[in-house]
Image (spheres, helix red, strand yellow):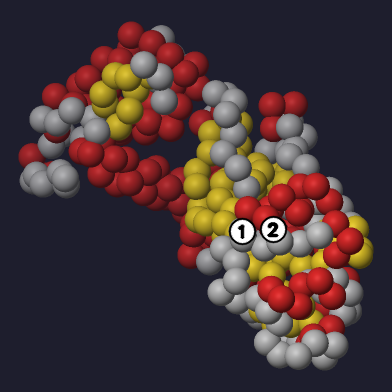
Amino acid sequence: MHICMDWRSVKFDWNRARAFLVTAEEGSLSAAARALGMAQPTLGRQVEALQEELGVVLFERTGRGLELTPSGLDLLEHVRTMGEAAGRFSLGASGRAQALEGTIAVSASEIDAAYLLPPVIAKLRRAAAGLTVDLIAKNTASDLRRREADIALRNFRPDQPELIARKMSDVTARLYASELYLERFEKPLTPHTLADADFISLWSPETYLGALAGAGLSVERGNLTILSDSHLVHWELLKAGGGIGMVPEFLGDSTPGVCRVLEGSYTPFIFPLWLTTHRELNTSRRVRMVFDFLAEALSAH
């Protein structure tokens, strides 16, 4: 369902639209009121006024709080785009993006920090020369509530109500090996030859074997001949011919000398990609600008 109306007949009130946007992101009026620093009844009246103004119902009450109606979902994308445009307008009105000075800490896994984010961060620095970016590469989740980072790129959606998250995409990972390693086997490599294959474990052996079994591959503990808890070390071992490993498509498919293996013999691994931050998104111009910048760049990627 799409909202079809003559917007020229609507007296637009950005405060009402912002109240709707934050309520949708937070999932309840009480959480949105805390995020915006206003009384809940005041926020509720703004949302109700917007519904009356548009002549549509935007939220439905459920046992878990508020859920967007189809009309609300449609409007959300428009209002979110308006919010991002408002941020860009603010930068333009200031005369120079360099006014966004200070440090912003961004946390991501080693692979994302090393291979996905660098061109995005470089572009960000060109847009905001006064900004210092602290890029934290770690495979455990930074605690945003304790300000270990301002923004995190994660493979899971946070369940803490004080965090704000936006899903970017689903990342597909597959099994790869170097051409050097595959010279040891008849091509193509099949599940019947797995008894002689070496696997590089990315996590604990139990977790890694469980992931492979869940994808449809029967691999024995003895096949895990190299163990590493570092994603970058895992990747370098794979390229050097150490065995079969799991990496994202965007990395494996673009690297010369590395090939997909066992295609059609297992279900590819899907990891959601979430951009997450704390409620300072609603009060800090710097956090809002960087969050929106990363969201736009990663969505395009």
2 and 1 marks in contact (CB < 8 Å): yes
Q: Tell me how many marks there are.
A: 2
Residue 212 numbered mark, or none: 2
> Looking at the picture, which amino acid does disc 1 mark?
Ala
Whole-number angstrom distance, CA of label 2 to CA of label 1: 5 Å
Q: Given the image, on which type of amino acid does mark 2 rest? A: Leu
State the image quarter where residue 105 is shown.
top right
Q: Secondary structure at mark 2?
A: helix
Q: Quadrant of the N terminus?
A: top left
Q: Is residue 195 above or below residue 82?
A: below
Q: Give the residue at x 89% y 74%.
A: 242
Point out residue 224 in the picture as x, y percentages from the top left corner: 86, 62
- Along the line of sight, which residue is nearer the eye, 116 or 264? 264
Mark 1 neighbour density, 10 Å: few (under 14) some (14–19) many (20 or more): some
Quadrant of the image occupied by residue 239: bottom right
Give the residue drawn at x 84%, y 83%. 181
Residue 220 position by quadrant = bottom right
Using the image, tell me which numbered label, if any, was put on residue 199.
none
Label 1 residue SS: loop
Q: Is residue 179 left or right of residue 292?
A: right
Q: Residue 215 got which mark? A: 1
Q: Position of residue 169 (x, y in %)?
A: 50, 56
- Using the rendered image of the protein, determine whether residue 287 is visible from the camera's viewpoint: no
